Amino acid sequence: MFGVLELLKRVAQTLRNDRLDRVLLALVVIILAGMLGMAYFDSLPLADSLWWTIVTITTVGYGDISPASVGGRVVGVLLMLFGIGFLGLLTATLASIFVEERRQEEKGVNPVRVTQHLVLCGWSYKAREIVEEIRADGANQSRPVVLIAELPSKPLDDDQVYFVNGPVTQDTLRKANAGQAQAAIVLSDESIEAHTRDAKTILGTLTIKSTYPELYTSVELVDRKNVEHCRMAKADEIIVLGEISTNLLVRASLDHGVTQIITELVSSRFGSEIYKIVPPQACVGRPFLEVLTTLKTDRNIIVVAVESVYQGRFLANPPNSYIIDERDRLIVVGKDRQA
């Protein structure tokens, strides 16, 4: 609703800027003059005269009403000469306004009005894969994604991907409606030198967290040495690229094929996936072992970890006697998030 009102305000502003408000006023005067003229010369009711005037100006020409007197025909000729011209000018201008609106959206100039969306900062091949991964998640197929990047136009043909042009600043975050977003992802800029990428990433993170402290922000870093700086910028989660690939390579050499399972769990595109859920009410206050058995039996999902509210951290494979609190979160493996 807010977006419609905003668009109407822009249309009204454009009409004033281009002096088309005068054209609209002239069109109203022509319609009134045609209606009164037809009513006077052909003795028609005002409602029928108005109907005939609008039908004539819009060139529909139903023919159910036509002027019989000379005066009525003169009025009809004047309507055809002036009314159609003014109406054509007005409709063409309105069409150009909507075309320009679409062009501004593609260039990332206009503010975005979506909520509960993901803010993706930076563009690379990974950004495209991130969007595809989000779309593959059953519960997030239609979740809006707002891309903030320094690009000439929107890089993806996706109706649920919105584009804001520019670096990560307070202005672009405001345009992306980041205050109403669910989370933000800050990608490393691969277009600049490797030793300066993390500096730009950390600066973007600092801008986000200083403007919207409550916005959960995941950050991609290149060098582990910069993790502490990123933590000082208040990043919620930090992913070090080189470290992950190194760990996977070591794991592949020690436990052959185990990385295939890891890849499956972190991808929504095939097989089972790992995600976080609220404990079902029937599981609250029960030991972990009972919850593990119950969820596997009833829902065919496996609990592999608990986000403990008391300890303030994740517990992988917690003790069998660990009591599940209603504020805890369960990390589970299942076929899809809908489970």
Image: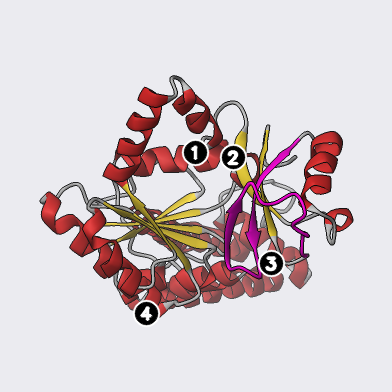
For the point 64% across and 39% down, the residue is 138
Spatial separation of the CA atoms under disc 3 and disc 1: 57 Å
> Is residue 125 in sight in this rendering?
yes
Q: Earlier in the sequence, mark 3 or mark 1?
A: 3
Q: Earlier in the sequence, mark 4 or mark 1?
A: 1
Q: Earlier in the sequence, mark 3 or mark 4?
A: 3
| Residue that badge 1 annotates | 133
Residue 192 relative to residue 227: left or right: left
Spatial separation of the CA atoms under disc 4 and disc 1: 28 Å
Residue 137 circle label: 2
Residue 50 circle label: 3
Vertical placement of 246 versus 122: above or below? above
Q: Which secondary structure lies at badge 3?
A: helix
Q: Name the one closer to the observer, 102 or 203.
A: 203
Whether residues under marks 2 and 1 lie with C-beta atoms below 8 angstroms apart, the answer is yes
Whether residues under marks 3 and 4 lie with C-beta atoms below 8 angstroms apart, the answer is no
Residue 287 relative to residue 181: left or right: right
Q: Which secondary structure lies at badge 2?
A: loop
